[in-house]
Structure formats: structure tokens, C-alpha cells
Image (cartoon, coloured by chain):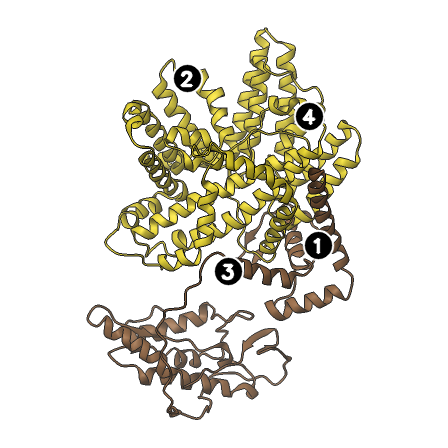
Amino acid sequence: MVFSSLVFLLFFLTASLLLHFITPFTFIRNLSLTLFSILFYAWGEPMWIVLLLFSSFFDYGNGLLIERFKGNWKSKLFLIISLIGNLGILLSFKYGDFIWENIDALCMQFGIHCPFPKPGFSLPVGISFYTFQTVSYVIDVYRGEVKAQRNPINFLLFVSLFHQLVAGPIVRYQTIADQINKRIVTWQQFSSGVNRFCFGLFKKVVLANLTGELVEKYLVDSFDVAAGIDAWFGIALFSLQIYFDFSAYSDMAIGLGRMFGFEYLENFRHPYAAKSIGEFYRRWHISLGTFFRDYVYIPLGGNKKHQDRNILIVWLLTGLWHGASWNFVLWGGYFGVLMVLEKYSKNILSRIPSIFKHMYTLVLIIFSRAIFYFVSFTDLFNFIKYHLFDFSKGSQVGLLTDLMENCFLLVACILFCIPWDELKANEGKVFKTLTSSYMYVAPLFNLLFLFISICLLVGASYNPFIYFRF
Amino acid sequence: MIHKINSIVFCLALVVCCYLFWVWHLEPLKSKQLKALIETEKRIPSPWPAWSADSYFRKDRNLTDSIKVNSYMDSISLYIDDHMPFRKELVEYAQILRSFRGIHLKQKEKIVKPRRKKQQQVVADEPSGSEIRFVENFNAEYSGSLLILDGKVYNLTGGSTSMSPVFAKMVSSYAQQYKGQTRVFSAVAPVSCAFIPVEKYRKYNGMNRNTLAAIGSNLSNGAIFSDVFSELNKHAGDQLFFGTDHHWNATGAYYAYVAFCKSAGFTPVP
């Protein structure tokens, strides 16, 4: 199930809110929220709900054992068992086919087939998100940063919370540990959750989906005829689509969390305003970046030892996290190399005017979207070779007409990419005044966003969600 | 206070939407909407799916290009979508909202007006000697301009010979523009009603033939006419079109390919 669907908006959300608030005790609230979360997951993934339950109880047990044997070698043993189990699940279900295909291709060089059968598992929805959550939990328990959860229902709730289960943000146990055990929802918190959810819904259904329709036109339907200008426009649109799609889901997750009394950390902070690649990834999918920083980069030595190697490892892993395909590895490698190059050219970059730094970042980020978009290397190389740098002719697919016919949509997209609260010109004062007065018109805007979204969802055939496949 | 109002308004909106959906299931509101859906979208609304372990555990998959099998949960989503209260109005509002995306330019396509002079009919809609196998017993009903005959849908039109020269002129202008660079073909398809297996509708066969033949006779500048109609007409007894879709099927496309090969000087692959 996705948030931007009629089933969710009309029935699931209404029923889950109703049941949550008519029950007086936290334990019963947690139980009802857990059951709703399982239903939410089972709606789109009826088969692999078993895997989610197994993963939860496996790490629930490991967490308790790690804490029980704290200071003892057994504690490390259970941590290793947990890591092997979690990464084993991820490798089998997400990367099984990919590994098999590569081994088979290697075997074919020697005229033989891969000796073991292809796993052929369908990718369980959200496996990358919940596996990383449970991994972070056992590591934090081992490090003594959090206490192990003793109630299995509460632990299952942490893993399966439907707000962030299938598409993040990756919520660490320490962020919501206290809220799981006891939470009070204030009117202000609920109201701010409603505002965030409705805004996210609007961003997804209006900005992401309508931009996505144009992306289809430029990168799929007109792929064979696109000139350079069309190709750049297509991937620039895809950059907008993926941002609004994913950040909207995070907005909705954070909003839903607040409605139910949970405070999740921000996952996006206007990434397209960044002036360097490093800054971009401190603003984009923050929960994934901090996961890799805390559990991979720093343990590898961080800035102190083999920094270049550490950066490359982290980025190759980040690429692989996004999907079992070589294009994602290439994508990760591309950013790894850029990060290292940026590190060595810090002095030069600091002397460049801001506007050029913005442009440099945007061009490199937009180009990277082509690597991200085309899963097939053949398509990617054809796109770069025959389309991206073909400036010998003008638009072949009516770019000017599309710009005019979508001008308000594109202007809205650009406006929503600007970090108004960070602008130096007014130190965010105008923005703060606007946001504080927004609460008085918020009920009307929320109803409007809800109405527009329902209108566009009824009878809609195009409602993808890009980060669902990760 | 304002936070309280905001929260309550949102929750009320959700409850009202949910309540409306259930109320909508009461006759006659629902049946009126469903009738409108059948009329406007020419399809039967998705029914509430029957549960089975297979339907529950399978994921959506395409059996063929035209048949998609939905999982149980997705079928429920489709049911809710089709039975949404005020669905027709909401879809209309969506169209209006979508138009706010930008400024809509006037179409710049070259409009060629048909000549006032009445075009000479090649043959007055007389049916050609086709291979249609007519049936005596059939079930026929009309839905707007559509004829539903034994479960197959036909759009009853034969085109107009007055528009054929207009189209031919456009194609000929491209042939002139690309002279020496490439060959320009015209391979216009007849519509499925040209091959309705009922005597009563035989006139559409002749109308389609005349419209398309008039294109051929008006082409100039070396534009080549592919006589798709004649080739399909030879096999009119076969299933050349989909039942509820106006497109030709693989068989129909193959005979059109044969016609194209003949006009292009290729030997068609059998």
C-alpha cells in the first residue's frame, strides 16, 4: 500500500487513527498500531511478511542476548550472528539473482553454467529499510547506546511502523525508543503532522506525478529521437521527479509519525540548493547518509585513516544499497570519485563564486540521474553517446511547447526546491513570519491539498513510487 | 485553539469521505454512477474480487500483452477507484486541475481546408467483393455511436471522401519536402466496421474502401499508396481486429504489412 492511494486515504488512515485514539493505554495503542502496520505491509507484500516477522524476532532475541552478555565475548558473538543473519537475508533476497547472474556470466567464460540454481526471489518491499533499522538497533545495543527492548510487540512496532516501513526514512531505535514506551500526542503536534502529511501528499500527487509524466515522454517515448537539449531536459525533470517523490514520502512519514506521537528526524533539507556534492548528500536522504557514516565510515577509520578508501567503500555500498545492478555500482563509484576529488580541490572550490558552485553541483547531480535512471548499460551508453551531447539540432519533441504548457508546474517545482528559511537576504524572517501565520489558513489548505490529491488519484493510471523498489 | 480546529477538520474530512463511500453503495446513487461510468469509459466497473489463496499471494502480472491479472489487494484498489462517490465529477475536476499546469498554446499545425467542390465518389458506397462471412443470428445493441454486436464493439464510420484529398495533399507535401532523401508512404487502415459480419452493415465496407481509395488517387509528388484495405478485405473472414479495442490485432497488422511490402517492392515474410 502507498500513502498516495484511495485505500490508504479513505479507509486505512481513518481506521488506524480512530483505533489509536479510542484506546487509552500505550500498550493497546502499540498493539493496534503494530497490527495496522502488518496489514499495511501485507497489502502489497503478502508473501514476505513472514520475512519481516522473522527479521524482527531474530533481532529482538539478539538484542536481548547482546545486552545480557554485555562485556563478555558472547555479546560480540550474538552481534556477529545478527549481522550475518541480516546481511544474509539482504544478500539472498535482494542480491541473490544479481550475484548468480554474474557468477553464471563468469562460468560461461569457461564454457560451463553456474553450478547452483538461480534463487529467483521477488524483492521484498522495503527490505533495505527495515534491515538497516534492525542492524542499527543491534549495533547500538552492543555499543551500549540504547537499552534492549524487552517487549516483543514494542520491538515489532519499531521495525514495522507503517509510516516509514517501506520507504524510510531509516529510523534508529534511539530516536523513538522513549516514544514507543510512552507518548502523548498534543493538538499542536497532531496539527503539525496533518500539515506535513497534506503537503507531502500534494507534493507527491501533483508535483512528482505530473513531472513524472513528462519524464516518460522525454526518456521513454522519445528516447530514440531526443536531441541533446531534450535529453538534458528529460534528466533534469527526472531529478525533480525523484526529489519530490522521495521527499514527499518522507514528509508524509514524518507527518503521520507526529499524528501518532512519534518524532522522526528530517530526511531532506532542500538538496538542490547545495554548493558541493558533499553538501548535497548532507541534505539528501539524510537517514541513509548518517547510517553509513556511523556504522561503516567511522568504524573503517573515518577522516583519520585511509579516508579516500573509506569514502569509496561507503559510496560503492550506497550505490549497491539502491539496487542489485551494475548501474547503481557505477553511480556509487561516480559519487565516491567526485567526493574524493572535491576533498582535494577544497581550496579551489572555496574561491569560486556561489552561483558557479551551484551550477557545478547541479550539472553533476543531473548527469548522475542518467546513471541512476538507465538500469541497462546499453541504454545508458546510447543515451550519453547519441543523445546527451548531440547539440547539432534543436528539440525534436516540442520542448518549447512543453515548457509553455507546463510552465506553472515547473515554476512551482523550482520554488519548492529553494530553501526559503536559509536565505541570507532576510535571515529567514519573512519565511518565519509566513510559516507562523500559515497555521491560521492551514485547515483550508489541508482540505484543498486533500481534495486536489483525491481528484488526481481517482481514475489515475500513473502513480508510481520510485523508492519503493529499494 | 487553531491546532485543535486544524486537527478536527482533517479528521472530519477523512470520516466524511469514508462515510460517503459507504452511503454511496446504497441504490440508486451507485447504479446511476456506474451507468455513467459504463457510458463514458465504455467498460464494466471492477467488481469486488473473490478471495482465493492464489489471488491473494500472486503479484500483478501480465498474461499476455492485453490481459493483466491483478492481485487480490490491487483488485480491491481498483474496485474502490471505480466505486468512488462523485467519480465522474472528480475525474472532470482532475482534468481542469491538470490544465493549470501551464499556458496552452494554440495548435500550430497547418490546417488544410477541404475544397468546396464536392468530390466525385469513386463508387457510391457499394460494398466490394469481400470475404466477409455473414451471420444470421446475432445480438446487437447500441451505446452512443458504438455498435455492440455479439460482444464485439464497432465504431460505425466509413470516413469521408471529401477529406481524403486533404490528407493526400499533406502526405504529398511531405513527399515533396523529402524528395530524393526518402520514400513517403500512405498506409491508412480501415476501421473494424468495414468487416462487420452482418448484411445490414455492409455499406461500411464500401464507405471505407472509397475513403481510402480516394487517398490513393489524390497522392502526388511520388508519395506511394499502400492498399491496406484491399489486402485486409481479402481476409475479411478472419479476426482482424480486437473485440473491444478499435486497433487491429496481429493478424490484421500482418496483412497490412503484406500490403506495405507490395507497395514498397519487398517480398513479405510468410
Q: Nearer the viewer, residue A308 or A363?
A: A363
Residue under label 1, please give it.
B50
In the picture shown, does residue B81 fall above or below B190? above
Q: CA distance from mark 3 to mark 4?
A: 45 Å
Residue under label 4, please give it.
A180
Labels 1 and 3: the sequence-earlier one: 1
In the picture shown, does residue A87 fall above or below A381? above
Residue under label 2, please give it.
A302
Label 4 or label 1, whichever lies nearer to me, is 4
Q: Nearer the viewer, residue B173 or A184?
A: A184
Q: Which amino acid, mark 2?
A: Gly
Q: CA distance from mark 2 to mark 4?
A: 32 Å
Q: CA distance from mark 1 to mark 3?
A: 38 Å
Do labels 4 and 1 touch, CB within 8 Å? no
Q: Which chain is yellow?
A: A
Labels 2 and 4: the sequence-earlier one: 4
Based on the displayed image, in which of its 4 quarters is residue A186 positioned?
A: top right
Based on the displayed image, in which of its 4 quarters is residue A333 positioned?
A: top left
| Chain B on-screen colour | brown
Based on the displayed image, in which of its 4 quarters is residue A70 positioned?
A: top right
Residue A113 visible in image:
no
Disc 1: CA contacts within 10 A as few (<14), some (14-19) or many (>=20): few
Do labels 2 and 4 touch, CB within 8 Å? no
Residue under label 3, please give it.
B99
Q: Residue at x 65, y 63 (%)?
A: B45
Q: Which amino acid, mark 4?
A: Ile
Q: CA distance from mark 1 to mark 2?
A: 56 Å
